[in-house]
Amino acid sequence: MDGLIQVLLFTLLGIAFIVVTLTVSRLLGPNRPNPEKNSSYESGEQAGGDPWPKISTGYYVVALLFLLFELEIILLLPVAAKFGSTTDWSWVFTTGLEILFFLLVLSVGLAYAWVNGHLDWMKPKPASTENRSVVPPQLYEEFNKKQHHGH
């Protein structure tokens, strides 16, 4: 119990040190923001474009599937090692059924990901929809010409 109190005391002192340090820094430090300080700086050039680019989620799905099957190997390796060196057939039968159930669940998950297209790197682009307006395109062009010449 004495060791637990020491760990708790050390943790509380660490948290208190962080809170005090950040509070003092906030109270005493200068805070004079301006547009130049708030702008991003990269090689002296102004940043352009979207700061949050769209990243394909396919990379994350493949990474998660990789982790899933790595976990499968990690969990099955000790069982397989024990499986080959035992003579207790009731254990072999029970464990064999558990392994088959485990592999079945993982196979269903893989089939679900495959059927829903989560394993496709390049998603098919949607077909462009045609303009189904009842107004002929020539009328749009004439209207646009009138608008531009009117100003």
Image (tube, rainbow, N blue to C red):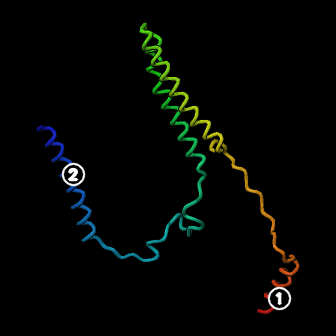
Q: Amino acid at mark 2?
A: Gly
Give the residue drawn at x 19%, y 51%: 12
Q: Nearer the viewer, residue 80 or 70?
A: 80
Crowding around mark 2 (Cα neighbors within 10 Å: few <14, some 14 to 19, many 20+) is: few
Q: Amino acid at mark 1?
A: Lys
Q: Considering only vertical position in the picture, is 142 above or below 98?
A: below
Give the residue drawn at x 45%, y 9%: 89
- Mark number displayed over residue 146: 1
In-image side of 119 versus 79 (left or right): right
Q: Which residue is mark 2?
A: 14
Q: Secondary structure at mark 1?
A: helix
Q: Estimate the spatial distance between the alpha carbons at disc 1 and disc 2, rounded to whole Å.
A: 72 Å
Where's the C terminus, which quadrant? Answer: bottom right
Where's the N terminus, which quadrant? Answer: top left
In-image side of 123 versus 70 (left or right): right
Q: Secondary structure at mark 2?
A: helix
Q: Nearer the viewer, residue 55 or 37?
A: 55
